[in-house]
């Protein structure tokens, strides 16, 4: 195993408070990668020797993005629905049924090819850790299949049998909850790390969500919750009460919801691609940050309400429309995502961390928001290997 010295780094984001500020920014920096891990970071003038050396010519280096919320196991697309929505029709949770039908009809090979295509798309845009969920099968076999496929490609797999009530159970949601907490959970738990529920009008209410998350937790899955996206509701309080790793969306929050998040270890994961793609009201990141909550940014990549795999795009939206500074947005898209996945080995460039990094065709991470829509990610490294 050879070590590599990256030098000539104009600006290095380490997310290590030891280097000052939450971003741990070092100018005129260097870092050493050894055995897939970060071995050293600091000023270039103090860099140790290594077997190989790469001068990045003043470019910025930042941690790989940690996208802690996506739905990548699906088939088909919903161009027509998006087009209709942009022509004035409101977003409703029920559009998920279109994707459920297409996903059930797809072969394993087609589903996996689509997943791999989207993972590669995210990787090219700097995402080195990608969470993904089930939720478009909604039968025992289709949910288990989705999770088994996902687990071949990522460690961060979430059981979302409770995305919506399966169409076959539309008249008997209690029976569907029994399925999700019974035979479906039995089939899915071996493939997943997390359990999630869409706690929302038109999906699952607070009592149903509690039953589903509690059942998942009893099988060793840690809760995360789709909470307070379309309306005010019990999702955030439930997430905090059950010790969920994150409450995701957080668009409609009471003062009590904000206070509960701030006083907890539950990360508020904001998904601005969803508000962009549904022309909805933005979540108020500033309010959460000022209250002391931990905020993550993620794509929510899915074919219905947020069909983007681009963390840089989400970061630009968060800065432009959600009151985040460029520094806060970058932290939330890297270290924040790692916290939302309870990972300590990714999201930062500190000694011992996995060597997941991006070399930008820019002198500073601020360019993600300053130059929106411009492909700034020049190289992506994961575990010390150049992968894009
Ligand atoms: Zn989602």
Image: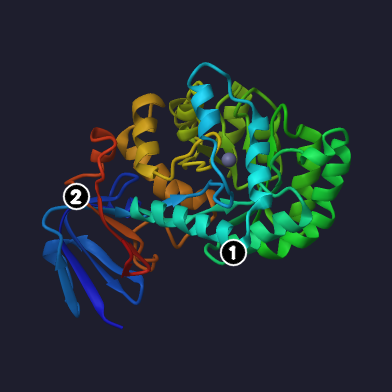
Q: Residue 315 at what x, y percent from top left?
A: 37, 38
The front one of 164 and 368 is 164
Residue 283 appears in view: no
Left or right of 97? Residue 80 is: left
- Badge 1 element: helix
Q: Regarding ligand 1, which quadrant of the image does it lie in? A: top right
> Does dot 2 land on a helix, a strand or a loop?
loop
Q: Residue 151 carries which label?
A: 1
Q: How far apart are marks 1 and 2 (CA)?
A: 32 Å
The quarter of the picture where residue 350 lies is bottom left
Disc assigned to residue 361: 2
Q: Residue at x 78, y 55 (%)?
A: 140
Q: Which mark is residue 44?
A: none
So how many labels did they put on this image? Answer: 2
Q: Residue at x 72, y 33 (%)?
A: 203
- 1 in relation to 385, above or below: below
- Towards the viewer: 199 or 74: 74
Determine the residue positioned at 34% across, 77% down: 35
Instruction: Please say whether residue 186 is visible from this viewpoint.
Output: yes
Residue lying at the far top of the rendered structure: 88
Asked if labels 2 and 1 touch by Cβ distance under 8 angstroms, the answer is no
Nearer to the camera, 45 or 18 = 45
Across and down, in percent, residue 130 comes to 48, 55
Give the side of residue 197 with respect to residue 381, left or right.
right
First of labels 1, 2 by sequence position: 1
Give the farthest residue toward the bottom: 1
**Where is the C terminus found, in terms of image quarters?**
bottom left
Counting from the top left corner in percent of width and height, residue 88 is at 52, 16
């Amino acid at each position: 195993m050879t070590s590599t010295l990256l030098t000539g780094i104009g600006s290095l984001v380490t997310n290590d408070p030891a280097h000052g500020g939450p971003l741990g920014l070092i100018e005129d920096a260097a870092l050493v990668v050894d055995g897939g891990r970060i071995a050293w970071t600091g000023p270039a003038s103090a860099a140790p020797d290594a077997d190989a050396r790469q001068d990045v010519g003043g470019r910025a280096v930042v941690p790989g993005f940690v996208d802690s919320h996506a739905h990548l196991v699906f088939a088909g697309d919903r161009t027509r629905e998006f087009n209709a929505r942009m022509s004035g029709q409101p977003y409703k949770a029920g559009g998920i049924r279109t994707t459920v039908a297409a996903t059930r009809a797809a072969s394993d090979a087609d589903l996996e090819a689509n997943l791999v295509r989207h993972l590669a798309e995210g990787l090219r845009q700097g995402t080195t850790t990608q969470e993904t969920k089930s939720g478009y099968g909604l039968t025992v076999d289709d949910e288990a299949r989705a999770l088994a496929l996902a687990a071949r490609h990522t460690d961060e797999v979430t059981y979302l049998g409770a995305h919506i009530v399966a169409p076959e159970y539309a008249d008997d949601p209690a029976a569907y909850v029994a399925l999700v907490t019974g035979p479906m959970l039995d089939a899915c738990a071996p493939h997943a790390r997390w359990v999630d529920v869409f706690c929302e009008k038109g999906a699952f209410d607070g009592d149903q969500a509690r039953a589903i998350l509690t059942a998942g937790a009893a099988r060793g899955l840690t809760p995360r919750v789709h909470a307070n996206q379309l309306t005010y509701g019990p999702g955030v309080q439930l997430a905090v009460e059950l010790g969920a790793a994150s409450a995701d969306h957080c668009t409609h929050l009471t003062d009590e919801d904000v206070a509960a998040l701030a006083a907890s270890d539950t990360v508020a994961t904001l998904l601005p691609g969803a508000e962009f793609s549904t022309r909805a009201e933005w979540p108020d990141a500033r309010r959460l940050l000022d209250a002391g909550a931990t905020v993550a940014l993620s794509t929510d990549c899915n074919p219905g309400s947020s069909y983007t795999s681009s963390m840089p795009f989400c970061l630009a939206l968060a800065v432009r429309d959600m009151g985040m500074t460029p520094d806060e947005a970058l932290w939330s898209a890297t270290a924040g995502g790692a916290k939302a996945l309870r990972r300590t080995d990714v999201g930062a460039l500190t000694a011992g961390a996995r060597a997941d990094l991006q070399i930008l065709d820019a002198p500073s991470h601020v360019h993600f928001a300053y130059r929106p829509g411009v492909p700034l990610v020049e190289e992506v490294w994961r575990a010390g290997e150049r992968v894009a």
